[in-house]
Image (spheres, rainbow, N blue to C red):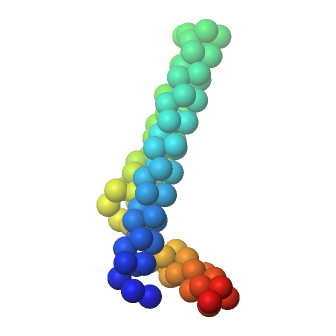
Amino acid sequence: MDGEDQDFHESRAAVRSLTGFFVHALIYIVVNAVLVFINLLTDPFNLWFYWVMLFWGIGLAFHALDSFFIHPREQERRKFDDAWDETRRKAG
């Protein structure tokens, strides 16, 4: 595989990772806004929504670390490269 193909695959994996994180963050915001509304509407003296926000927020923080800092994408990239090479062999 030449360098251009490798750059393409690395870029594609990075974009997928970032897109996944931003979708996760958007869902976190929307769902938790609904949960806050439901909690305050039904029982404003017994707050429970913050527990969901806390634990889900921890998961979101790990997703952010993975997407922006860690990037353990080598195995995914190798599998994609193998599939791409197989497709090119069959086509040509």
Q: How many marks?
A: 0
Q: Residue 84, how many percent across, how many down? A: 57, 80
Q: Can see residue 55?
A: no
The residue depicted at 46 percent of the width and 65 percent of the height is: 13
Q: Which of the pair 65/23 is nearer the observer?
A: 23
The residue depicted at 61 percent of the width and 9 percent of the height is: 41
Q: Which of the pair 73/38 is nearer the observer?
A: 73
The residue depicted at 67 percent of the width and 88 percent of the height is: 90
Q: Residue 86, how many percent across, how many down? A: 62, 87
Residue found at the very far right of the displayed protein: 90
Dividing the picture into quarters, in which one does residue 6 lie? bottom left
The residue depicted at 62 percent of the width and 16 percent of the height is: 38
Q: Which of the pair 56/82 is nearer the observer?
A: 82
Q: Residue 11, how many percent across, how many down? A: 39, 65
Q: Can see residue 67?
A: yes
Q: Which of the pair 10/63 is nearer the observer?
A: 10
